[in-house]
Image (tube, helix red, strand yellow):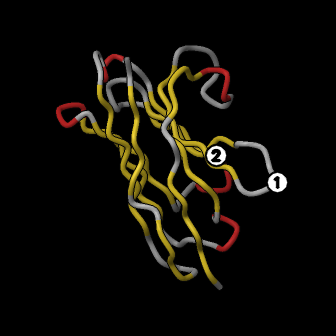
Amino acid sequence: QVQLVESGGGLVQAGGSLRLSCAASGRTFSSYGMGWFRQAPGKEREFVAAISWSGGGTYYADFVKGRFTISRDNAKNTMYLQMNSLKPEDTAVYYCARRSGGSFYYTTSYDYWGQGTQVTVSS
């Protein structure tokens, strides 16, 4: 079975940076695309960024373009989300997920999810 564990969340001031990690266990990590989603209280889970199985293709939600960078290290079975210029509206629980197919924008395109890591951005 596949397990995904996020880490690196915390409290940061507006304009600061955080680097999230997603460590994967199980078979064939390098054969799957991966994505990051986030969910704020009272809101639906929304797409943040995605990366192809090889790392050659990256995709971002409009509200994070130019601020966030997704990457992966298949040798370490780990995916990353570098978050710069953080804003209070970025406050949410961030989840990593393994893509199973379909559009990378939708939660239904992913079959395994981590437990989430809290990111809080203060004014």
> Hey, which quadrant is residue 4 in on the image?
top left
Question: Alpha carbon of mark 1 to alpha carbon of mark 2: how far?
Answer: 20 Å
Report the quarter where the C terminus lies. bottom right
Residue 103 is marked as none
Q: Amino acid at mark 1?
A: Gly
Q: Report the number of numbered marks.
A: 2
Q: Indicate the secondary structure of the residue bearing disc 2.
A: loop
Q: Nearer the viewer, mark 1 or mark 2?
A: 1
Report the quarter where the N terminus lies. top left
Q: Residue 37's x, y, as percent?
A: 59, 43
Q: Residue 38's x, y, as percent?
A: 63, 49
Residues 41 and 79: in front is: 41
> Hey, which quadrant is residue 92 in on the image?
bottom right
> Hey, which quadrant is residue 41 in on the image?
bottom right
Q: Residue 16's x, y, as percent?
A: 48, 78
Q: Is residue 66 above or below residue 87?
A: above
At 68% across and 28% down in the image, what residue appears?
106
At 50% across and 54% down in the image, what residue appears?
117
Q: Amino acid at mark 2?
A: Ala
Q: Indicate the secondary structure of the residue bearing disc 1.
A: loop
Q: Which residue is mark 1?
A: 42
Which residue is situated farthest in the right direction here?
A: 42
Q: Residue 89's x, y, as percent?
A: 70, 67
Q: Which residue is mark 2?
A: 61
At 29% across and 39% down in the image, what residue appears?
78
The 10 Å Cα crowd at callout 2, few under 14, some 14 to 19, many 20 or more, is: some
At 44% across and 24% down in the image, what residue appears?
33
Q: Is residue 26 above or below residue 68?
A: above
Q: Is residue 13 above or below residue 20?
A: below
